[in-house]
Amino acid sequence: MNTSQELDASALALDDYSAMFDGDSVTIELVTPEGGSGLFRGGKGGVKGKGDPKSQVIVSTIKVGVCKDDLIAKSICGDVDDRIPSTDDRQGRISSGCTGWLISEDVFIQAGHCGTPSSSTRLHFTYLRTSAPVQDQYSVDVSTYRGLNAGVGSDWGVGRLLPNTSTDKLPGLAQSEKCGGSGCGWYTLGDVPSATGGNNIRITGYGTAAVNSQSQKTHVGALANIADYSLQYVPDTTVRVCFNVAGLISYSSMLGSTLIHGLCTCLIKNHHHFCREAIQARL
């Protein structure tokens, strides 16, 4: 898929990196003011235009590579992966491989073990395993991010996303246009149920799989146990070796603002919910 992105000095001032592109090569074109000349430098070499340069681009960092999927199921209950393809506009795949969920026009949450976002981090709003189009990629305002990675019940992250560099739209507004309603492009956080009875849960995320690995998938199953800062559940989930993948869980009667923790057993899996005082204060 051919895609492109136009960046000027003001866009680069907000974030030092371009969007992410799939493929084996990327072409950079420098457009200079009429009558001027330009300078392009990449790495140790360089190609210079004639005369005094009035515009330039310096490629100082390139992030590239593929992380091999771990296709051995870590938390599939039984012999069959029962997850099915999903098209939920309220969440996306972070460039680290984890899942991120919108909870307002520009606030996202993730698992803390996914790591602290950098200026090169992108949240891709796509259902597929490929990178999202440029207009559906969003960078993180890293100054706003706060998180904790201390195991089950203490594993959370929250921050704000910047407007898209091509459309100048906030992600929640853009995603709401896709689902056709005001505010439908993000989750509304609800209370954790007081009992498991009658409360199946849906887990939606970008876990690994033998087919369409890291595309958006979902599964509904039983809520097995509710503790002070964690839940146990039955639906199928997976992680990957180099990227821990999280998924959002919604209860049958309300939204459960929860994240999967990758350490789990086949029959009942642990994850944490957002009733900890620290993340509530941050939200």
Image: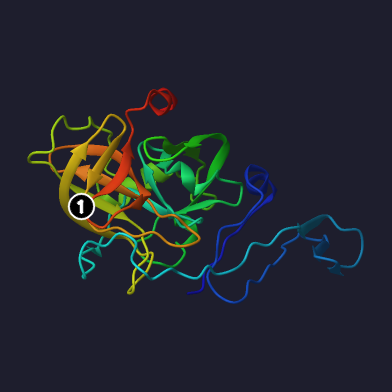
Q: Position of residue 262 (x, y in %)?
A: 38, 51
Q: Residue at x 50, y 43 (%)?
A: 163
Q: Is residue 96 above or below residue 282?
A: below
Quarter occupied by residue 155: top left
Q: How is the image coloured?
A: rainbow
Q: Name the foreground residue: 165 vs 195.
A: 195
Quarter occupied by residue 230: top left
Q: Amino acid at mark 1?
A: Val
Q: The residue tagged with tag 1: helix, strand or loop?
A: loop
Q: Is residue 207 left or right of residue 198?
A: right
Where does label 1 land, which residue?
Answer: 234
The quarter of the image holding the C terminus is: top left
Q: Name the foreground residue: 94 vs 33.
A: 94
Disc 1 residue crowd, few under 14, some 14–19, many 20+, Cα 10 Å: many
Q: Position of residue 178 (x, y in %)?
A: 30, 53
Q: Name the foreground residue: 6 vs 184.
A: 184
